[in-house]
Image (tube, helix red, strand yellow):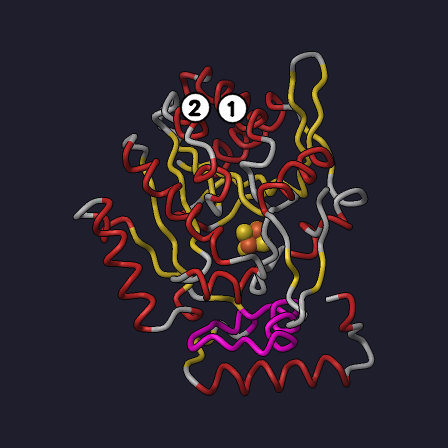
């Protein structure tokens, strides 16, 4: 039986594999051999030099720097978003890409590997459009489910136009636990996902949100990744957390202050103690503002 409970440190304890199954029941259904998946929106974005993006909802982690946690929380899944079949979703993405002359289409927002059957059907559709053969599909994932089951990689292999972008939550099991609230042993699934993807030669990018990693943990992570492939360094992208209002609230309440972050409003890079000061100041402003209900951030 799945449960979310608080331990003595008031940390949420949950099993992301079990949570995936429960979330899947809420964000996907099967009708006439078609897997319908819940989306939040479709949009044109500047990421990867321009990409058509479908934001799915539902995730198996609760990261404290997640801009989309509000729409991914299990309790919100029922009331947010809309279902879409694989054909409609593929067409929508290709339409946005064609209109904007984009080379990339992607699934983002929540965790797309929850409801993986929908992704596979969508990829088959994209594959069927030969006129779109220059299109690359980016699957943005935390990798937990891929690390749990190699068969995900075996399926993805059938679609050479796929790029998988695994976003690591911290550089060590301890940092993973601090960020997600999940027992550190699940961090291994993220690393396993990378191992499997490289073993099968799937085009893979590894994203690391560096502000939550120490110098030591980052070094150890690189050493571990180098054991997977010696040129893996060229597949690593460093990310910096963006301090949206809901992220400020979560980080402040967790007393978790990255050493580098971005103020997305002013597009300013903050470093060192400035990050903590900024988070404390903005949190106080939100609390004191008549217009901001901070409990809803
Ligand atoms: S894995 Fe991604 S979508 Fe899920 S909570 Fe973390 S940052 Fe958000």
Is residue 245 shown in magenta? yes
The mark that comes first in sequence, 2 or 1, is: 1
What residue is disc 1 on? 120
- The quarter of the displayed image where residue 18 is located: top right
What is the x, y in percent for residue 6?
Answer: 70, 64
What is the x, y in percent for residue 34?
Answer: 65, 17
Looking at the image, residue 145 sits to the left or right of residue 194; the answer is right
Can you tell which mark lies on residue 155? Answer: 2
Question: CB at mark 1 closer than 8 A to ligand 1?
Answer: no
Total number of numbered discs in the rendering: 2
Can you tell which mark lies on residue 4? Answer: none
Q: Disc 2 to disc 1, how far (Cα)?
A: 8 Å
- Cβ atoms under marks 2 and 1 closer than 8 Å: yes
Circle 1: element type: helix
Is residue 69 shown in magenta? no
Q: Where does the magenta region start and end? A: 243-265
Q: Residue at x 45, y 37 (%)?
A: 146
- The quarter of the displayed image where residue 207 is located: bottom left
Q: Residue at x 60, y 43 (%)?
A: 55
Question: CB at mark 2 closer than 8 A to ligand 1?
Answer: no
């Amino acid at each position: 039986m799945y449960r979310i409970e608080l331990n003595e440190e008031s940390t949420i304890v949950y099993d992301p594999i079990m949570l995936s199954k429960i979330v899947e029941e809420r964000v996907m259904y099967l009708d006439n051999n078609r897997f319908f998946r819940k989306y939040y929106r479709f949009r044109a974005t500047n990421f990867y030099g321009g990409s058509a993006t479908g934001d799915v909802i539902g995730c198996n982690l609760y990261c404290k720097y997640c801009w989309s946690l509000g729409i991914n929380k299990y309790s919100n899944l029922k009331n947010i978003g809309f279902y879409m079949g694989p054909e409609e979703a593929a067409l929508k993405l290709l339409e946005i890409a064609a209109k904007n002359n984009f080379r990339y289409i992607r699934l983002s927002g929540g965790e797309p590997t929850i409801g993986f059957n929908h992704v596979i059907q969508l990829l088959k559709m994209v594959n069927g459009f030969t006129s779109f053969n220059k299109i690359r599909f980016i699957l943005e994932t935390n990798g937990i489910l891929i690390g749990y089951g190699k068969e995900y990689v075996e399926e993805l292999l059938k679609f050479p136009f796929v790029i998988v972008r695994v976003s690591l939550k911290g550089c060590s099991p301890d940092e993973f636990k601090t960020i997600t609230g999940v027992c550190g042993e699940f961090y291994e699934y993220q690393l396993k996902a990378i191992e499997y993807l490289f073993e099968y030669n799937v085009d893979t990018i590894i994203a690391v949100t560096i502000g939550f990693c120490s110098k030591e943990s980052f070094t150890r992570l690189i050493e571990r990744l180098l054991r997977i492939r010696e040129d893996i360094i060229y597949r690593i992208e460093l990310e910096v957390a963006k301090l949206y209002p809901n992220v400020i609230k979560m980080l402040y309440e967790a007393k978790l202050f990255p050493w580098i972050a971005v103020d997305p409003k002013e597009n300013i890079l903050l470093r060192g103690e400035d990050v903590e000061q900024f988070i404390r100041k903005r949190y106080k402003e939100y609390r004191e503002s008549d217009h901001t209900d901070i409990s809803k951030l």
